[in-house]
Image (spheres, rainbow, N blue to C red):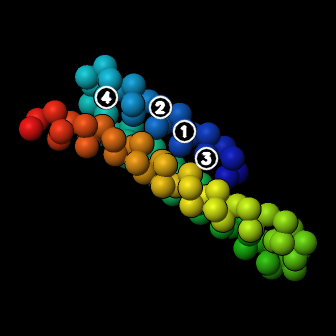
Amino acid sequence: MWMILGVIAIIATITNLYMYKSGKDYKLAMAMGLSFTALTLCAQYSLVSGWVEEGDWSALMDVVPSMEMTLWFLTIISILINIAPILLERKNKK
């Protein structure tokens, strides 16, 4: 599930940038990109929670250490890319 939500977040982010570039209202796409990023993180957390409930420690030891940094990095990148049009718009107004 988290992969599907992640792909939707990427598509929404690309749509956000496209709409900004074409001069259309991009704020709904921006909100969708950030929302699907949050849902992706929640889905990943649910997956890990299920592993804890099942006692699947090998899955936790294999996945969690590498996914922690990856999720932090991708979340920060998603936030920066999604808010970039707002920052660019403010810069152009000055």
Circles 1 and 3: CB distance less than 8 Å? no
Q: Nearer the viewer, residue 32 or 85?
A: 85
Query: Quick check: marks 1 and 2 in contact, CB under 8 Å?
Result: yes
> Residue shown at 45%/44% (left/top)?
33
Q: Secondary structure at mark 2?
A: helix
The percent coordinates of residue 81 (x first, y second) are 42, 42
Q: Which mark is residue 14?
A: 2
x, y percent for residue 10? 54, 38
Q: CA distance from mark 2 to mark 3?
A: 14 Å
Vertical placement of residue 47 versus 73, above or below: below
Residue 20: assigned label? 4
**Residue in the picture at 74% in, 62% down:** 66
| Image depth: mark 2 or mark 3 in front | 2
Please give the residue where the numbered disc 3 appears in the rendered image: 5
> How far apart in space, not on screen, are marks 2 and 4 (Cα)?
10 Å
What SS does tag 3 mark? Answer: helix
From the viewer's perspective, tell me whether residue 20 is left or right of residue 37. Answer: left
C-alpha gap between disc 1 and disc 4? 15 Å
Cβ atoms at labels 1 and 4 below 8 Å apart: no
Of labels 4 and 3, the one closer to you: 4
Element marked by disc 4? helix
Check contact, mark 2 vs mark 3: CB within 8 A.
Answer: no
Q: Is residue 26 above or below residue 4?
A: above
**In this rendering, position of residue 55 left or right of residue 32:** right
- The residue lying furthest to the left in this view is 94
Which one is earlier in the sequence, the residue at label 2 or at label 3?
3
Vertical arrangement, residue 32 with respect to residue 41, above or below: above
